[in-house]
Image (cartoon, coloured by chain):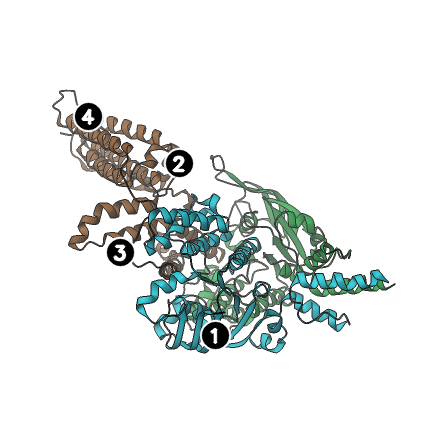
């Protein structure tokens, strides 16, 4: 498989004056927010990036989207170098981005106008804009809300408006920069369902999150700490590396912690069981052996 | 309290007025504003009020809703009324110590108050019936000829639309910060003017800081969605004049003509309480 | 301090066409020394409720008593209530405004008219409670700090008023796992070591199950359920039908039953509880 996003020895250093106010996360980031990161993300994959505040994960997201240009090293999106000024609009329409705060990324006062903002900027012909936005709004389940004003929507609905806005640009890859952090559980699960749906139809997903329960739904997890990727693997590999998780200031998913408790009591839960569904299924199945007796 | 501010908001309805081309509505509003200043007597104002009432009725925007929007500007109207009532010389009607209310003063005060009310009602009808995005598109389109002399028409229009989009967000933010500071014992309501002004610092500083943060985040989100100014932009709803727009243009011309004719006095009809 | 809420009703825009009943005849008690969790989906009236408990909103009808004093009465002294009942809103870091951290924390005590020496002392105490090193942070601008640090400054600003009841709206929202954990531990420490009664609004059912002594479930402006976490989360189907989540342990048991396991575990909350229930279930099967 070919890769859609690559970072080669990426370094990013914030200049003093631009760092603190930019957003709450960045103030914590040390002078060098990313310090030698080399990653390649496969087309069509679902990758979660986890790490504590100030680990550089948000900065990395902005480097992919060419909102930030590497201080050193190289980032490419579908073969295009993010440092190349000519390519910047192609890069942004190839790798779209959904941010954390639902309020601060909606431009227009009407939902459908906002969804159309991206295609309008790209110069898409009018009849096609209509097709694209209708399709995007239906896909994320906000078509019924298309005439509403954004400030009357819930957080989860606003975030889905933002996703539709990115989808209407027909990207190959979408980066979610802590897009679920400010949502309530209902909103969060709606957004996660949309993310999985998009991935299943081939859109590459890069999900930056604090929630381990969301990260386990990815097919690859990268742990960032102090501007570096300290661990990289499938969710079951990652969550068996207990000390790395702890050192990176993260926590194990509840299912893994519970499986640990059970193992301690002699129930042989296999290592790869990291989701609640898998744990429940394994336990139900394990119990059945006694039914047979 | 802050939620009461409805001025400048869009009120979604399916009406003829809502469907009109924004350029027509902007031009009509502009002409209407001029006409308010052309009017010289209260017959004229009665006519303008009737027309405004008719348009409002057609627009399906509830008068109650519009009246609520007037609340925050009521102070200005009362203020100008009070100022005007005392400054004009003429036949003294009531004497309050050194201040005199004259017939001219009373007339002028009522006249200006009516003018202000008509002005605000009329312009707010424009924002109630026109989506902010259309409004700014309309402005942009009207101002486009001026780009040749260096006017950044698109940028101005975009700034206006974002300002409108963020009014409710900032109001909510203000409400939140106010309550948070009140919870820490802040008192916004009592004390003399100086003390009250000072008490607003804990409200305004966080509000500005947050507004800047919003602006930075929004700018980034816009860039991420390939915003690069007005060049090469297409539109979801491009503007095209329809039959109804042409009818509206004719009607507004007739309205203007009627006001001018009446104000010029050539009809020979008596003027109701005109200024001298 | 104990808070009694009696028949509290709040109607926004009363008498107008768009009137909304945000609270509808709500009665409950926050016990002295408890950590009372308030849960409910967005728009269920939680936020309106806590604003009444601090006197920021006046009820349409009903009363609230703090240790027997009616705080909804006109004669009550607001500063006195604000001093006794502290309220920390969601994302409180966005209300910081002073030049330095110490000055910002001093804002509350100053408004209450305390002496400089007393204020100084309280700033010190509040900062040490929230793990903010005085030497390092006192003279810094709050705007230079990280998100997590700013939040602790904001909470210290309320703690400096030394409230007997502390109401917190989603204090851990948006924090990374480590900061989340330390925020919740701070809440527990305030309760156990400083005897502060806590009212905690949260969407995180695992936090509620782990830290709260009592839970109130709000739905559509009414109290839907109340009791200890075990009593409340026993009603798992009703909670799910209201679009609310469940603590992990309860989810696991439900999921196992969906997979045909037939395991009983009504009072299960945490993962540890669930593990115990699983072990019991296996034991029974072995016999």
Q: Quadrant of residue B66?
A: top left
Mark 4 sits on what residue?
B273
Observer-nearest of C152 and C273? C273
Q: Quadrant of the C terminus of chain B?
A: top left
Mark 2 sits on what residue?
B13
The image shows residue C76, relative to residue B213, as above or below, that is: above
- Gap between marks 2 and 1 measured at Cα: 51 Å
Observer-nearest of A142 and B216? A142
The image shows residue A164, relative to residue C145, as above or below, that is: above
Mark 3 sits on what residue?
B231
Is the C-beta separation of discs 4 and 1 under 8 Å?
Answer: no
Q: Colour of chain A?
A: cyan
Is the C-beta separation of discs 3 and 1 under 8 Å?
Answer: no
Which of the two marks, 2 or 1, is nearer to us in this view? 1
Give the crowd class for mark 3: few <14, some 14-19, many >=20 residues within 10 Å.
Answer: few
- Drawn side of residue A5 relative to residue B102, left or right: right
Q: For the residues tagged 4 and 1, is the chain the same? A: no
- Gap between marks 3 and 2 measured at Cα: 32 Å
| Chain the render paints brown | B
Residue under the image location 32 percent in, 54 percent down: A123
């Amino acid at each position: 498989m070919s890769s859609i996003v690559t970072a080669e020895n990426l370094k990013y250093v914030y200049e003093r004056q631009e760092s603190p106010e930019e957003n709450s996360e960045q103030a914590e980031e040390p002078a060098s927010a990313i310090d030698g990161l080399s990653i390649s993300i496969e087309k069509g994959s679902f990758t979660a990036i986890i790490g504590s505040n100030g680990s550089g994960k948000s900065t990395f997201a902005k480097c992919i989207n060419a909102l930030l240009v590497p201080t050193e090293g190289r980032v490419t999106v579908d073969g295009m170098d993010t440092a190349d000024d000519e390519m910047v609009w192609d890069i942004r329409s190839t790798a779209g981005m959904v941010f954390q705060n639902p309020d601060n990324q909606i431009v227009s006062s009407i939902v459908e106008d906002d969804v159309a903002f991206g295609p309008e900027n790209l110069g898409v012909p009018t009849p096609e804009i209509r097709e694209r936005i209708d399709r995007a709004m239906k896909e994320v389940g906000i078509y019924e809300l298309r005439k509403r004003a954004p400030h009357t929507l819930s957080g989860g609905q606003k975030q889905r408006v933002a996703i539709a806005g990115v989808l209407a640009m027909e990207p190959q890859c979408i980066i979610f920069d802590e897009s679920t952090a400010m949502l309530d559980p209902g909103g969060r699960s709606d957004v996660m369902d949309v993310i999985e749906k998009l991935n299943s139809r081939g859109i590459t997903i890069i999900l930056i999150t604090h929630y381990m329960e969301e990260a386990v739904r990815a097919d690859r997890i990268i742990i960032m700490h102090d501007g570096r990727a300290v661990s990289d693997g499938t969710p079951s590999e990652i969550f068996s590396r207990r000390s790395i998780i702890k050192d990176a200031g993260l926590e194990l998913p509840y299912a893994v912690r519970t499986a640990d408790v059970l193992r301690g009591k002699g129930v042989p839960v296999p290592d790869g069981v990291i989701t609640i569904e898998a744990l429940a299924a394994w336990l139900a199945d394990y119990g059945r052996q006694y039914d047979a007796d | 309290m802050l939620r009461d501010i409805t001025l400048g908001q869009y009120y979604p309805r399916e009406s003829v007025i809502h469907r009109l081309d924004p350029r027509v509505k902007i031009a009509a509003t502009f002409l209407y504003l001029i006409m308010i200043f052309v009017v010289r007597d209260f017959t004229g104002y009665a006519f303008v009020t009737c027309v405004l009432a008719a348009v409002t009725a057609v627009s399906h925007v509830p008068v109650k809703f519009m009246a609520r929007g007037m609340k925050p500007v009521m102070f200005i109207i009362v203020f100008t009324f009070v100022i005007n009532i005392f400054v004009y010389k003429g036949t003294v009607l009531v004497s309050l110590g050194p201040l005199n209310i004259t017939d001219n003063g009373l007339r002028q005060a009522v006249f200006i108050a009516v003018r202000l009310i008509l002005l605000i009602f009329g312009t707010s009808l424009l924002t109630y019936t026109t989506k902010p995005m259309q409004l700014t598109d309309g402005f942009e389109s009207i101002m486009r000829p001026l780009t040749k002399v260096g006017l950044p028409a698109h940028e101005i229009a975009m700034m206006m639309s974002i300002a409108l989009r963020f009014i409710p967000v900032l109001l909510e933010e203000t409400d939140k910060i106010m309550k948070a500071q009140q919870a820490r014992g802040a008192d916004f309501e009592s004390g003399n003017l100086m003390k009250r002004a000072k008490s607003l610092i804990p409200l305004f500083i966080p509000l500005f800081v947050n507004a800047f943060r919003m602006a930075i985040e929004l700018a980034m989100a816009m860039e991420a969605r390939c915003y690069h100014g007005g060049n090469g932009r297409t539109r979801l709803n491009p503007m095209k004049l329809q039959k109804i727009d042409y009818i509206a243009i004719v009607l507004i011309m007739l309205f203007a003509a009627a006001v001018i004719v009446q104000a010029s006095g050539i009809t020979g009809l008596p003027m109701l309480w005109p200024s001298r | 301090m104990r808070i009694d809420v009696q028949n509290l009703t709040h109607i926004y825009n009363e008498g107008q066409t768009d009137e909304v009943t945000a609270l509808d005849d709500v009665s409950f008690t926050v016990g002295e020394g408890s950590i009372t969790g308030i849960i409910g989906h967005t728009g269920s009236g939680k936020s309106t409720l806590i604003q009444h408990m601090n006197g920021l909103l006046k009820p349409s009808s009903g009363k609230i008593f703090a240790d027997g004093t009616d705080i909804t009465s006109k004669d009550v002294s607001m500063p006195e209530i604000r001093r006794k009942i502290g309220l920390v809103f969601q994302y409180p870091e966005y209300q910081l405004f002073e030049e330095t951290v110490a000055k910002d924390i001093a804002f509350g005590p100053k408004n209450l008219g305390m002496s400089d020496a007393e204020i100084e002392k309280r700033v010190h105490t509040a900062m040490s409670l929230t793990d903010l090193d005085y030497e390092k942070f006192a003279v810094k601008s709050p705007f230079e700090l990280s998100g997590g640090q700013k939040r602790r400054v904001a909470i210290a600003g309320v703690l400096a008023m030394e409230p007997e009841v502390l109401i917190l709206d989603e204090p851990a929202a948006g924090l990374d796992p480590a900061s989340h954990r330390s925020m919740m531990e701070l809440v527990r420490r305030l309760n156990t070591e400083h005897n502060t009664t806590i009212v905690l609004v949260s969407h995180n059912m695992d936090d509620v199950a782990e830290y709260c002594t009592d839970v109130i479930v709000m739905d559509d402006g009414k109290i839907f359920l109340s009791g200890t976490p075990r009593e409340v989360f026993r009603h798992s189907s009703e909670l799910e039908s209201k679009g609310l989540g469940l603590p992990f342990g309860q989810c696991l048991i439900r999921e196992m039953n969906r997979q045909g396991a037939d395991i009983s575990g009504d009072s299960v909350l945490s993962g540890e509880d669930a593990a115990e229930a699983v072990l019991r279930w296996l034991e029974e099967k072995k016999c």
